[in-house]
Image (tube, helix red, strand yellow):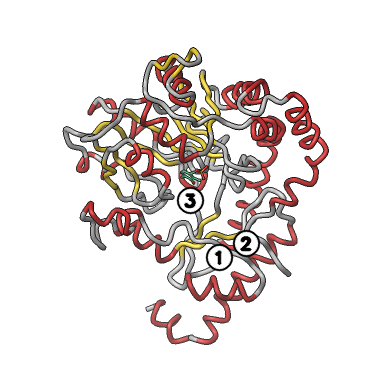
Amino acid sequence: MKIPFLDLKANFKPLREEILAEITDVLDNTAYILGPKVAKFEEQFAAMHQVAYCAAVSSGTDANHLALWALGIGPGDEVIIPANTFVATAWGATLCGAMPVFVDCDPRTYNIDPTKIEAAITHRTKAIVAVHLYGQPADMDALRAIANKHRIALVEDAAQAHNATYNGKPIGGLGDICSFSFYPGKNLGAYGEGGAVTTNNPDLARKVRMIREHGSEKKYYHEMYGTNYRMEAIQGAVLGVKVGHLNDWTENRRRVASRYNAGLKNVDGIVLPFEAANVKHVYHLYVIQTEDRDALAQYLNDKGVSTGLHYPVPLHLQQCFAHLGYKKGDFPVSEQLGEECLSLPMFPEMTDEQIEYVISSVVSFFEEQKSANPAKVESAVI
Ligand SMILES: *Cc1c(COP(=O)(O)O)cnc(C)c1O
């Protein structure tokens, strides 16, 4: 049996007619950039996340940059960023000319560890970027308390967490400003590049819209520096259809996760995802941890099960940040995760048969290991 890591064809098939009609509408009306379909999607997306303003943009990476740009972050500033995340989280700060300052993650949630942030704050620190990693909201109450105490901004990177909630409230309006990605493989994906910035702050919302449009509100009058970070109309049309299905897809991701949890909970040698009591995790990724990561990945691959690594090298050990002077050992939790994480197939359309096949493949790997190496098991017991 072949199990893909995600199945975008299965996702497109039931939406095909509706999406083609919407795209055709864009082509017929020739408003190819922003326009009414993007505006309507922005309204739907803001309402879903109970946030006042949403600006659709050209990618999640651009949204990261735009969020920090609108906050006025620039050269000489420092921005706190988790070491365990996708590199794009750090581009927001670097593209503004600021310096990323990395912080280790919590060993259970894998999100930034609030207890380690204050040691990294200096008089230059201007913001904390909280990533809701793998679909689980970061510890926003603790982060808000730190941000308020030091009078710095709190930014959410929700690229992996559309529709997630924290204390019953949707993410997206919990910090001062938030970025989303609609990369095709995300929980809500466009058919190309796409992203969004959300905020409850009217001043920031106005700046985001201006920067997205060459620093202007009125055509050819440029109030501030800006760029072109506009969303294409075709992506807005696609997202306008897809956003109506996001609740169902989220529930299906949670169904897959709970089946995985039930099927794998008695397997010795793996750590399953932890879901904090006050959040709704939306399982962009289902990440397990095991010392036998590479062997398990190979075994699953041989059985036809595709897996992923999120992320094998924490940001502080990336070559592009070598000049910042971090070294191995600085962030042990992120480093261990880099060596031991393995993402199992996760997509809303997964059938029970596919889920069971992944579970039985993981179980048989550990059973075969036990029988091949009983001494190891005995010494582990002692
Ligand atoms: C995907 C992702 C981004 C970047 O989004 P793009 O749309 O691919 O540019 C940023 N941050 C995180 C955490 C992501 O997972």
Measuring from the top left, give residue 238's x and y in whole percent.
Answer: 69, 35
Give the mark, 1 or 3, whose residue is nearer the N terminus.
1
Considering only vertical position in the picture, is 135 above or below 357? above
Q: Amino acid at mark 1?
A: Asn
Which residue occupies 61% across, 65% down?
A: 306
Disc 1 element: loop
Q: Which residue is mark 2?
A: 263
Residue 272 spot, x, y in % from top left: 50, 58
Q: Residue furthest right?
A: 17
Tell me if mark 2 has few (under 14), some (14-19) or many (20+) residues whose alpha carbon lies within 10 angstroms of its own. Answer: some
The secondary element bearing badge 2 is classed as: helix
Q: What's the CA distance linking mark 1 and mark 2?
A: 8 Å
Mark 1 or 3: the one toward you: 3
Sequence-wise, the earlier of marks 3 and 2 is: 2
User: Which element type, helix, strand or loop, lies under badge 3?
Assistant: loop
Front position in the image: 295 or 328: 328
Check disc 3 and give the amino acid type: Phe
Q: Position of residue 330 (x, y in %)?
A: 24, 57
In space, the residues marked 1 and 3 are separated at their CA atoms by 15 Å
Mark 1 lies within 8 Å of ligand 1 (Cβ measured):
no
Q: Label 2 is placed on what type of residue?
A: Gly
Quadrant of the image for the N terminus? bottom right
Q: Where residue 262 sits in the image (x, y, percent)?
A: 61, 57
Quadrant in which the C terminus is drawn: bottom left
Task: Name the residue that disc number 1 marks.
Answer: 266
Residue at 46 percent of width and 62 percent of height = 341
Residue at the spot of label 3: 274
Q: Quadrant of residue 244?
A: top right
Residue nearest the observer in this picture, 34 or 43: 34
Q: Is residue 35 left or right of residue 115?
A: right
